[in-house]
Amino acid sequence: MSAPLVRISSVVKRFAGEAALDRVSLDIPRGAFTVLLGPSGSGKTTLLNVIGGFLVPDEGDVSIDGESMSGLPPARRPTTTVFQDYALFPHMPVGANVGFGLRMRGVARAERDAKARDALRLVGLEATFDRKPHQLSGGQRQRVALARALVVEPKVLLLDEPLGALDLKLRRQMQDELKLLQKRVGTTFVHVTHDQEEAMALADTLVVMNKGRIEDMGPAERVYARPATLFTAGFMGEVTVLSGRVAGADRVEWAGGDLPIAAPQTVGTEVKIAVRPEGLVLGVPEDGMVSLGLIRVREVVFQGASKRVLGDIGPDVAPIPAIVRVGAEVPVEEGPRVPLAAKVGALLVYPEAS
Amino acid sequence: MHRLLDGLAGLYALAVYVFIFLPVAVLVLFSFQATLFPVPPFTGPSLKWYAAVLSDQRLISGLVNSLLVGVLSSAVAVVLGFLAAYGIARFTLPASKAMRALIAAPLSVSYLVIGMGLLIVFNAIGLPKSLLAAGIGHVVINMPLCFAILYAQMGAEQANIERAARDLGAREWQVVGLVTAPMLWPALFAAFFLSMTFSWDEFVIAFLLTRFETTLPVEIWSLLRSGLNPKTNAVGSLVFLVSIVLVLLLEMTVLRKRR
């Protein structure tokens, strides 16, 4: 792998004494789609603003392509930003909006217009060149903002929840377009969102943030299937969480018995065991599975392609809520207790406090 | 019963409008009087008093002076108000709330107090009574107004748009010149025309701060001292006409903003 394009080293940013970024270090690969994902207040937007130069970190450094960015205002960084509310210039036609960055770089009118048209063609909006932003729909404004940021050929394109203001259907559609666009232009995209579905669809590299720290980072498939922390496991999708204790080299015991899984912790340590809905199976264990006892089915939610089964497992005095995904064709009734099994490979072990 | 109430309400509304507009209507009507006194019966219509106004050198120079003072003082008030609003809205300054309150404070001070205060200050620094002094007075009363109008238009959305301009490489003067000011055109126009309207018929400050050359309201005042005649009606009607035009311009710019 080539050298990272953006290198963030031990960045700290405090607001009124509270650390919004708590010694964050991160390498962002060149030419890839990187998504910063986290709940609100996790520091993801703060990190984006630090990269873009809108915020000055209290400690640490950001370098892009080997050059330190410290002391450089946004205008002099090789980055451009797509803002959540688009921030188009309301008094300028679309063409002038897109050409603005080139105008600031002293590009002559004719060349500027030609490049602006090319950028608009890239997002499928060439026909809007002479229109004013208020004549466009939300999705179209979004694309104009993209064209305006890309036309100056930044090394890094920063996207601050760019799809947040769109309705769900349009958001999914724009998401696909954004991914295609990134592949076509090859620019490094850094995208902030709190929507994990959007994040998984877009990310080559997924960075999960929480409370000003990076919880996990890697390919989306890996972060979903084998999250590094319990927080990430819970944030990336639904999980059933069991409390247990390491009982041996490859044995963890919980209220319902022993599980044949290896834990790095020493024997006797309290741990959490997490498993995704698709890692659980209604029925007696087959090869590669382990029994979790009985589940009392509380609720069955039909979701089209699958059913989401909510129930309780473990001892009656301290029931543990469990979520199972089964095929839409599997008959499940609410009420009775049925056997529940887990795929051994899908069981994840985390230290008690993570 | 309903009809009766509707009828009464209509009469009441009519009475209110008559109360408001009758003086103006009478003023305008008797400016067309053909005889010497602006009292009934109406003897016109005649344009002789308008001819008298337009051939009165003092009134015409007063009108020109008023326009000059109005345009220049309003322009200065808008520029100063814009810069103050931009500074306070966009930069973290010490005691910015107090500064905001202090800038807006003259709005609540009477013109008489402002005029006397300026008179004392100008005396002390040796600035003679003049159109310049009156113009400065009008900047003092209109700048807070311009500041308030423009400050209200510099919200978070505008700030983000300016951020986008900076992000795309604009320097500070380019941000102000190419984005902030053009984006606020309607508010800038509104502030300018409102200042013009206030400056145009302002009397107290102009009376206190001018001597030989003076503005139209002060000229009209000295005309009135020699008694009523249809000439005062005619010049009053002209003042009213200009005010109407200014208000219409103001309405148009504000309406354009609401598009």
Image (cartoon, coloured by chain):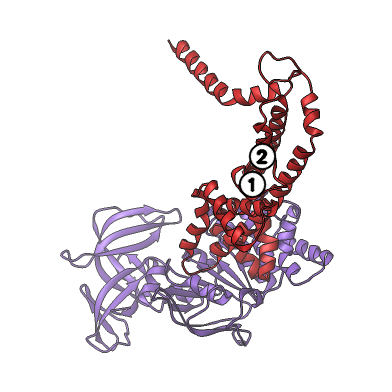
Chain colours: A purple, B red
Which percent across, then down, holds residue A318?
Answer: 18, 66
Q: Secondary structure at mark 2?
A: helix
Which mark is first along the chain, 2 or 1?
1
Whole-percent x and y of residue A283?
30, 64
- Foreground residue among B112 and B258: B112
Rendering coords of residue A218 (x, y %): 50, 79
Q: Which of the chains bears the disc numbered 2?
A: B
Q: Which residue in the structure is indicated by mark 2?
A: B217
Number of numbered tags placed on the structure image = 2
Residue beneath disc 1: B206
Structural crowding at the residue carrying mark 1, measured as other residues with C-alpha within 10 Å and reported as few (<14), some (14–19) or many (≥20):
many
Element assignment for label 1: helix
Check contact, mark 1 vs mark 2: CB within 8 A. yes
Give the side of residue B51 with respect to residue B75, left or right. right
Q: CA distance from mark 1 to mark 2?
A: 8 Å
Residue lying at 55% horizontally and 47% vertically, measured from the top left: B111
Q: Which mark is residue A92?
A: none
In front here: B53 or A143? B53
